[in-house]
Image (tube, rainbow, N blue to C red):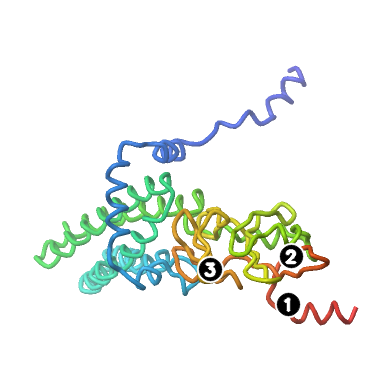
Amino acid sequence: MNPTHRQQGTQPGPGRGPGRMLAALDRLERWPKADRVIDALQLAVRSAPLGRARDALHGRRLGHPVHPLMVQVPIGAWLSAAVLDFWPGQRRGARALIGVGLLAVGPAAAAGWADWAELHRQQRRVGLVHAAANVTAASLYAGSLAARSKGREGLGRVLGLAGLTAVSAGGALGGHMAYRQASGANHAEEVPHLVSPGWHPLGDLADFPAGRAARRHVDDVAVLVVRESGDTVRVLADRCSHLAGPLSEGEIADGCVRCPWHGSVFRLADGWNVRGPATAPQPAFDTRVVDGRVEARLRHTGRAEQDEGEEAA
């Protein structure tokens, strides 16, 4: 045998690309046929008079979306019910767990719809199918509970397994949204890893009119610069932590900036997310004016200790 041929046979061939499932999801992200339905649903969710409850559904105080936490209850209850279905003498326990899962569906779905309405169009397309799979699962489990209450245990088990299959498919789509499409992720998390320590020049103080947003760069990171009055200058990372909207194009009012894409509001003084859908605060910078020029450095927790160390040095 030719040793060259034998050696070539051990070399890995070119990659085959995404499998059928990923290819189907990529097509779904680009599929516009349901956009009218999606737009109508988005308008309905955004128009709901939720008040402060909307931020609670987003998970603003928690620091990340609350929907992934809430769905653990119905999924865990239904999976446990499936286990009990194969355990002799556990009919009552299986029924109770199915009921618990059905009771938990409402709050979890409300949180999911609140988040869904503030996503990009491609994310909303996948999210609509994700929601449809979960609605199907809940309907199947409702049928399962009804069948069991009438003594039709066999049918109840079949419907329960079908519901578990549907909710598993919905969970896979939710994972695609979270990890492939980065819905719900903090889109400003990388800023502390990209900005080098120390002070960075931003420009002459006179270049920043009071009360107006300006866009500059610290290293390769875009930042929002707002001169409030006198020598007081506020600097935040420009890309919104929700979905990377440009804050420098947003409205400045009452010491805050409002993202032009989805309406998240951040306090200029420290980047705190005053209103969602953003669940993570915006990275903030300390500022100073030296010889008429504005300088900024990334603000870290424990800055006072760092300042003391710099003074001692």
Q: In screen coordinates, is 233 left or right of 142?
A: right
Q: Position of residue 238 (x, y in %)?
A: 60, 57
Q: CA distance from mark 3 to mark 2?
A: 19 Å
- Name the quadrant containing residue 302: bottom right
Is the residue 305 above or below the residue 241 in the image?
A: below
Can the viewer see residue 19?
yes
Name the residue nearer the viewer: 115 or 289.
Answer: 289
Q: Secondary structure at mark 3?
A: strand
Quadrant of the rendered image containing residue 34: top left
* Residue ID for mark 3: 256
Amino acid tagged 2: Ala
Rendered location of residue 45, percent (x, y): 30, 58
> Could you say where residue 214 lies in the image, as x and y percent from the top left?
63, 56
Residue, disc 1? 303
Q: Does residue 284 appear to the left or right of 115 in the view shown?
A: right
Q: Earlier in the sequence, mark 1 or mark 2?
A: 2
Q: Nearer the viewer, residue 51 or 134?
A: 51
- From the image, which quarter does the C terminus lie in? bottom right
Residue at (74, 65) in percent of width and height: 296
- In front of the other: 251 or 95: 251
Disc 1, disc 3: CB below 8 Å? no
Which part of the image, by quadrant, shows the N terminus?
A: top right
